[in-house]
Image (cartoon, rainbow, N blue to C red):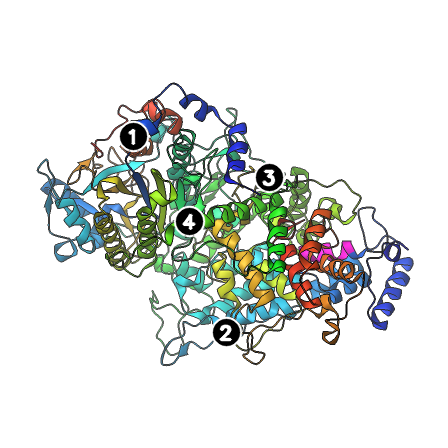
Amino acid sequence: MFTRRTFCQIGAASVGSLALRSFGLLPALAQSSPDYRALVCVFLLGGNDSNNMIIPMDDANYQAYRALRGDIALTGSALAPTVQSIDGKPYAFHAKLAELSNLFSSGKLAVAANVGPLVQPLSRVQFQQGLAPVPSNLFSHEDQTIRWQTSMAQDTIVISTETGWAGRAADYISAQKANSSQFPPFLSVAGNTLLGTGAITQPLVIAPGQSLGLIGFNKTPASQRRWSALNSLLSLESGVSLVQASNDMLAHSIADATGLNNALSKATQLKTQFPNTPLGMQLRQVAQIIQVHTDLGMRRQIFFCCMGGFDTHTSELSSLNYIYSLLSPALAAFFDATEELGMAQSVTTFTESEFNRTFQLTSGGGTDHGWGGHQLILGGAVQGGQVFGRFPKFQFGGPDDTDTRGRWIPTTSIDQYGATLCSWFGIPDAILPSVFPNLKNFGSSKLGFMG
Amino acid sequence: MHLLSKGKIMLKSYSELFLLTAILVISAATPGKCQSSGSPVVMTDRAAARFLDQATWGPTPASITKLQLMGIRNWLAWQFSLNSSELPDQPIVLGGGQNLDPIPVQRAFFQNTVTGEDQLRQRVAFALSEIWVVGWQQIREVYAIPPYWRIFRDNAFANYRDILEAVTLNPAMGSYLNMANNNKGNPAYGTAANENYARELMQLFTLGLTQLNQDGSPVLDQNHKPVPTYSASVVPNMAKALTGWTYPTAPGAVTQDNNWSPYYIGRMFAVERNHDTTAKTIFGNITIPSGQTAEQDLVSVYVALMQQSTMAPFVCQQLIQHLVTSNPSPAYIQRVSNVFLDNGRGVRGDLRAVITAILTDPEARAGDDPGALTNPNFGHLREPVLFIANILRGLNATLGPNSLLNYGTAVLGQNPFYAPSVFSYFSPRFHTEKGLLGPEFQIYSTQTAADRANTINSALYGSLDGTMKPDDGSTKTDLTLFTGPTKELNRQSAGDLDTMLDSISRVFLHHSMSSNLYQAAYSAAQTAGDKKARAQAALYIVLTSGEYQIIK
């Protein structure tokens, strides 16, 4: 019979350096604290126009914003009421993000400004004249999604060994035996994702509201015989690679289904109402799994959710109104659920999106693919009500623009963003460079939004 | 008498015996015609079934026999001549509003996979539609689907440029990637030309991001870095070249410079005052001169794209992955790319020649010979539509007026015509945990692996899309191929199980069932009760196995 251990052994034999380095040199995470911590990634697929998500409202910035964004500049009631950050600066969220604006005011939500993939800090001159390395295949959806999920700014030579940064963090958690069960530390409720693929751990994927497990079996001898036959086949090493990969996935699914279903059967109904939207259902599922984390033997977990619809090349005003009106209540409900569970301090939700969009609009009232963008961090442990990092200078062809359309060169790297999250999660400073290889190229590995 | 001595042919009627005789006669008269890789002159049952797993939605006893009768070359010529699968036009208005019901189109699609004769055309068209993606959740109006689908059906064996031209001016793609109403930039409003179609046309439909050698490997610069196909500044220039097109004018509407309401029938047309006439420098340092019309710029773009030799491996590798194997050797890609570049008569982009090259390549055909050494990395995961269609054909299914098979494939990550984005259902670059390319594995997860097994359970023990009542209009399967006549379900004799497993192996595994799988299926079936229960148990074990899920 196949067990999860098989995966770990295969993985450890082929990689191992991360795991080995962590043993002995550092205090085992299990000894450091008995608490539970979860990271929840909400990926905004398509390239969120975060230029219209949060806007600096000081005169200089807002006037530049209005002048350059033309027909898609938000004014008046298209903006939520202006809020003050802790350091006294005025910002306004998109009107459809009213719940998030309130969470910013109440200190539960922080913003990281102009984050994106970078090899090293980069200036406009360096970019335009090719004087410094830049991320591979900028402005491509698929490639920049990979950048955000791997935190590898450039394609590796052997792309097939790519792992996600959360997968590498999960590898460490697994090697430290931080969790008392073999249940995967990374769980996606939105399909396969490179983010959670580690060298020794693999994501568990479930669909919200659907249970894993095979149907059609009962206690009759014939059924038991069929069940044994199925499992005996899955335990064989076929020597045929894709066949093996196919069998391994089903084996992985069967192995984790029982534990998950048993744990979830102990969940109680959450009082928090989630919107009946794809993201709402994903986040409700995550909240339910967090609720039963002790039954699963989990002390460290990473979750992946995803929402599409952000590729707003045309008619952006109406598109953003719609998608933000789906995003904001779902995130707010999830925060409420963590409070209901008494676990708001233990759960940190953060956004990723493959890129921001051009500050300049297209002829159809939309925007094209950009680069650095603003991200949201939400939770009880977040140093909320603040903007970390700096906004780009709103100027076409200005110091932060790659060209003349307002594709911002990031001023904070994904490595710094992810390392700040992982540090709170329990990845020691000495391990962070193995999770974020380019981190050493940036001055600070802690952006401050997690204290 | 290779065929008969192997004992793999089961004759159930005189007509099959007649066909076999015919095969032998034809084969004797035209030696070497069936095979190009040194296999026996007569196509074995295994070779025929295996070929049909690559070239159709799945082998059936009748299609295996037909291919054996015709041989590959004649079969291909026959398939190239067929164009029978239709997706019926849908009403624009339904119930007083927009028609947003895709079920009739999806039902026709699955019906075609099961009973349409033009199997190869359907497979190639579907593969092409997974490259030139329109995701209909964004278009929503379903009357636009059949005309768009016909681009791929009608040009599956035509020239790649035919598809390039037809898609570029198709109003549904115009809406999806904003080629429609992409007006030139207006300084007064601070706008620029929309880059959406320009970018994805190069990145996803024709060239990819990295220049490729003909064997699919990246072209490297002196620092061993991949050479990009185009620089960032090319995209705004391509966007300018593609300005000035708008939707066809709907019947009864007045033609405007910008028809803002989409109308999805016919071709987009140019409005010169919305076209950017400045000079544009695009990939390969090609300059499109100033002063050209929108149509002239478009022709310049077509010509420039077709000149790029990178297109050949970029397109061919994906077609090989869809039809034959996820990890083709560089030599295989090169052989097919060479045909793409020149079909032997100086024509570039001839898909009929490319498909022939893909399916008759020695690497594709190597596994036809059971004794040949096979590459352990060969093959590909059945994508959900292929998985369901294959089961339907193998289980001799009949679709009814209430068949809803798209729900089942949607759960598995593939709702036909509703790819989640222009990046399709899965990426040709996706890797498995084992480090191999496995595009279809992108939508194969712990969840969908269980869902596949549960789909098989439904197909065998329940219903794929309805109740178990015979008259509910849902999809019905038929196991008599494996059980024998219904009235004899309880009459069992020694050897029955072997015969059943042989016929399962023939249809679903082209006679390549491993001994391990054979034993597991035998063990599951042995205690299962009557012949139907035995067939169900054996089929469950076979269809849930990796050996079946991966087409080798």
Numbered tag placed on residue B104 in the rendering: 2
Q: Is residue B339 left or right of residue A355?
A: right
The CA distance from mark 3 to mark 2 is 39 Å
Labels 1 and 2 within one chain: no
- Give me the residue at 28% from left, 35% from top: A35
- Graded by Cα atoms within 10 Å as few (under 14), some (14 to 19) or many (20 or more), the crowding at tag 1 reads some
Name which residue type carries label 4. Answer: Leu
Q: Which residues are magenta?
A: B46-55
Q: Which residue is mark 3?
A: B216
Q: Which residue is mark 1?
A: A423
The CA distance from mark 1 to mark 2 is 53 Å
Q: Position of residue B99 (x, y in %)?
A: 41, 74
Name which residue type carries label 3. Answer: Gly
Q: Which residue is mark 4?
A: A260
Secondary structure beneath dot 3 equals loop
Q: Is residue A112 left or right of residue B171?
A: left
Magenta highlight on residue A107: no
Closer to us: mark 1 or mark 3?
1
Secondary structure beneath dot 2 equals helix
Name which residue type carries label 1. Answer: Ser
Q: Nearer the viewer, residue A411 or A349?
A: A349
Q: Is residue B95 above or below residue B461?
A: below
Q: Are marks 4 and 2 in contact (CB under 8 Å)?
A: no
Looking at the image, the residue that sits furthest to the top is A25
